[in-house]
Image (tube, rainbow, N blue to C red):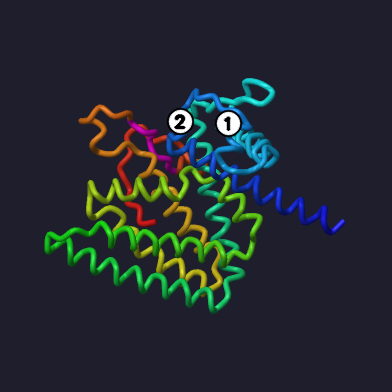
Amino acid sequence: MARETLKGLVADTLADRAYRSIRDAVATGELRPGQKVTERGLAERLSVSPTPVREAVRRLEQDGLLERTGPRTVQVSAVGDAAIHDLAEVEVALRGMVARFAARHASPEQLDLLDAVLDDADDLLILVKQRQQAGQDVARHVERLLDAMQRFNEVVEACAHNPVLVRLLDQTRVFSWPERRARLIERIAENDKFGLERYGSHRALVRALRAGDPVAAEALVLEDARGGLGDLLAAPATSTTTGSPARPSPPHDDEQGQIAVDPDPALRPETA
């Protein structure tokens, strides 16, 4: 019985990894809309057996990212704007729930770690500004700053002490971390002030977590998540002149508190 349970845990882990890998390949365009793939081909590509891939494919079909074309073949779906915004709405809500749980369960050590991460980020931000003023290259330091903010997000998720919730969030993210990072770097290259207006919200979040205030923590994260996803879903400023396809308009709150499509959005900055 113990052996069967262990096998189940291993299979689940492999299916999760296969799911994330295939989803990231779709998100980054490595697997293109309309492209047909086989379960066996994906298994060989990921160096795993077909069983976890089959489970991952079923989940991706439910997400609307893959469409069944045969017993063992699928094709990448053409994901429309509505589906992307539906996914964004789910991600925003789950991130808010993570903050709410974190306010209830964060340990003093985790809160100190959050402050330490932000101290490192503050030092990097000062260095980036100094190098920008001196006309020096900042690419390496910007990447380190983004890594620090990703670490901050990971610690907040750990503070929730709810692995089921964090797993759901990981499965419903609009962008994988590599694609999110690439888009952030693209935006910062276009505007070196990108994200600075909301940078202070991270300190405010830690204060809310220390106060054990789930309402305030959730509100801060919801506002940040909506603005951040909005910026990353919006077409970059250069797209109107280069002829590259525009991305969907960013989400925002409508009167019912749901994420809606803004036909003429004003860009909101994003830090992490």
Where residue 53 sits: x, y (%)?
64, 38
Q: Disc 2 marks which amino acid?
A: Asp
Q: Nearer the viewer, residue 257 or 237?
A: 237
Quarter occupied by the C terminus: bottom left
Mark linked to residue 64: 1
Residue 131 against residue 44 in the figure, above or below: below
**In the rendered view, does 121 fall on the left or right side of 18?**
left
Mark 1 is surrounded, within 10 Å at the Cα level, by few (under 14), some (14 to 19) or many (20 or more) other residues, namely some
For the record, the magenta segment spans 246-252
Which residue lies at the image location 54% right of the left edge and 78% below the top edge? 109
Q: For the residue labelled by badge 1, is the local secondary structure a helix, a strand or a loop?
A: loop
Which residue lies at the image location 57% right of the left edge and 67% below the top edge? 159
Where residue 112 sits: x, y (%)?
48, 77
Cα gap from disc 2 to disc 1, whole angstroms? 12 Å
* 248 drawn magenta: yes
* Picture quadrant where residue 213 is located: bottom right
- Residue at label 2? 81
